[in-house]
């Protein structure tokens, strides 16, 4: 059996989840984990390297899992990585995704590489369902997405970058009444900020100006502006306890009437005990897809919207037509 | 605006639904409806032709909707149609689908045509979700499909072919307790016949042997063998009233544990007021996909498993990356 040689860049919650799944799968060989931090160790006896030394592994590692935070230098890093490696990432800054993918596409094609981006559960799995539902319901319906209750890693990161904040966690919570309305009504459409509340728990550094912090959070562009945001100041222990629970939920509903007559409802529901492990789960399937695309010499930058669903299963197409169609 | 010139072959419930949607869409021009029956008329002033005269429209019609019953000669017919036309069908005999598609692929490529088969809601939309879920949950989970309560057109057709049967309708009904179990349990797997009951309402011809009819139904291979089947003999009016209601439901659940630890649940739910109109809805999106594949000279026989989801929306890829990813 052929083994896919993989590396992991970034060793936070997501990197650790990828590591644990990969070492439990025969199809993969984990060559090394790359981090900016020195002296890391793991109970799986993984080999660690500094991210700066990635280039040494060109030709040795087939596929990289890019699991660094979107807030960091992933845009810069990914371009460099795509010169030497194929990779999967779960980059999740929706507003930047288009440019990100188009830039990568040039680099990947030039270097005969395959990249698969934004390949998590949202963006990723839920994006795929949005496009599918919106395509079917385009005469009136609209795929409406709900997230939570669950922690948004991106928003928690964003708060931690506010001056005076020591640690923070942010819960995205669907507005109950709106959710019920969206399930019930047809040809209805709301923006994300009309559907969700944002609940923040923040620990501050000594002497910090809490009023200013609260204001800095609530007025943060692309993250909190337009949302009902609540900021709670709590102690460090409370935040740390909250950070251990990593469950999340996703929901998409699209109610529409065909020819303005026939009620049609489509729903997707996800319930996840572990957000990072589910993202890792998807990215690992993504690595198999990258491998398939490489076999077919289909170089370039892909997203979940570009990949036929047959690639998600290991079975050959004929077998899928026979057993799952 | 470019208009896609379409034809409809087969004028039952599905053909009629396709007709009504298509005449209400600017992107399509309905050239003709083809049937084996003579003298058909429609309130939409559609032009009717005999199916035998289809060849006359070669070069005139871009895409055909094949909406004849799977029980009829669709396999023979589709091969002939693929020589002269691009088409979409919702052929639903799961057991024959593989050979059907592979045969069409040769014909379509030879004649520079695109065909899109089994493109309804099951097979079709639900097949896509099964493959997606099974790909993600392959270490323990299994996408389990439920249908109903709703009428199975295929099974109703099958009963009508039994000697002595005048008219019939068949409801597929999920077993309540099993459904609840499947939602609750993890890494669980059942066959379709363990999950559903089949409830039949039958009118017989005068003097028919009801015992024999009931036995013929219950022992029918590929349709009823292995199922809990109940046969009720009723009058013609009862069946006809039932045939006017065309609602249906579809449900897929896949519960699994990542690394045998993290509970993960994925669900798809469909609630349809009209089964034929939803199938028509999907097939019409399919025609747009065929059109896109033709523009890219990608000739051959496709299924929903082979088509990237980006093709479901009219927007260009860049726009989708920007707005829906």
Image (cartoon, coloured by chain):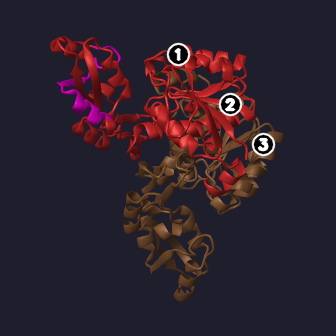
Chain colours: A brown, B red
Q: Can the viewer see residue B195 in this picture?
A: no
Identify the residue shown where x is 26% and y is 42%: B180
Viewer-nearest residue: B297 or B3: B3
Q: Is residue B72 above or below residue B59?
A: above
Mark 1 vs mark 3: give the one in front.
1
Q: Which residues are magenta?
A: B220-243
Foreground pick, B146 / B181: B146
Is A6 left, or right, of A177 in this rendering? right
At 40% from the left and 41% from the top, the residue drawn is: B274
Please, is residue A321 above or below residue A103 in the view?
Answer: above
Q: Nearer the viewer, residue B193 or A315?
A: B193
Q: Is residue B225 magenta?
A: yes
B181 horizontally vs B55: left or right: left
Mark nearest the camera among 2 and 3 is: 2
Determine the residue positioned at 55% across, 67% down. A155
Q: Position of residue B14 (x, y in %)?
A: 46, 33
Q: Which residue is the site of mark 3?
A: A108
- Residue extending farthest to the front is B39
**Residue count near mark 2 (Cα–Cα under 10 Å), binned few <14, some 14–19, many ≥20:** many
- The residue under label 2 is B62
* Numbered circle sitting on residue B75: 1
Q: Taking the image as drawn, is residue A156 in sight?
A: yes
Chain of residue at mark 1? B
- The chain ID associated with circle 2 is B
Q: Secondary structure at mark 2?
A: loop
Q: Disc 1, disc 3: CB below 8 Å?
A: no
Q: Position of residue B182 (x, y in %)?
A: 30, 39
- The image shows residue B225 at horizontal and vertical percentages of 28, 17
> Spatial distance from mark 2 to mark 3, Cα to Cα?
37 Å
User: Is B242 displayed left or right of B11 in the figure?
Assistant: left
């Amino acid at each position: 059996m052929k083994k896919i040689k993989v590396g992991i860049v970034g060793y936070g919650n997501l990197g650790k989840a990828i590591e644990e799944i990969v070492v439990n799968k025969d199809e993969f060989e984990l060559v090394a984990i790359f981090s900016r931090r020195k002296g890391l160790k793991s109970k799986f006896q993984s080999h660690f390297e500094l991210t700066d030394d990635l280039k040494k592994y060109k030709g040795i590692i087939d596929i990289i899992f890019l699991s660094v935070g979107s807030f960091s230098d992933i845009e810069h890093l990914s371009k460099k990585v795509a010169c030497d490696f194929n990779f999967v990432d779960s980059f999740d800054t929706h507003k930047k995704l288009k440019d990100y993918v188009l830039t990568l596409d040039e680099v990947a094609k030039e270097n005969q590489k395959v990249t698969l981006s934004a390949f998590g559960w949202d963006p990723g799995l839920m994006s795929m369902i949005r496009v599918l539902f919106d395509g079917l319901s385009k005469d009136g319906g609209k795929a409406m997405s709900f997230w939570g209750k669950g922690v948004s890693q991106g928003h928690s990161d964003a708060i931690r970058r506010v001056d005076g904040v020591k640690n923070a966690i942010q819960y995205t919570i669907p507005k109950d009444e709106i959710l019920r309305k969206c399930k019930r009504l047809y040809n209805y459409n709301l923006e994300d900020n009309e559907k969700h509340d944002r609940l923040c728990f923040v620990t501050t550094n000594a002497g910090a100006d809490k009023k200013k912090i609260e204001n800095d959070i609530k007025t943060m562009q692309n993250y909190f502006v337009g949302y009902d945001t609540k900021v709670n100041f709590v102690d460090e222990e409370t935040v740390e306890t909250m950070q251990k629970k990593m469950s999340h939920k996703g929901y998409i509903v699209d109610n529409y009437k065909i020819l303005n007559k026939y009620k049609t409802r489509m729903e997707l529901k996800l319930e996840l005990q572990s957000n990072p492990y589910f993202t890792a789960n998807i990215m690992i399937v993504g690595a198999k897809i990258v491998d398939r695309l490489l076999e077919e010499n289909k170089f370039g930058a892909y997203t979940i919207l570009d990949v036929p669903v047959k690639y998600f299963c290991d079975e050959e197409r004929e077998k899928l037509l026979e057993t799952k169609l």
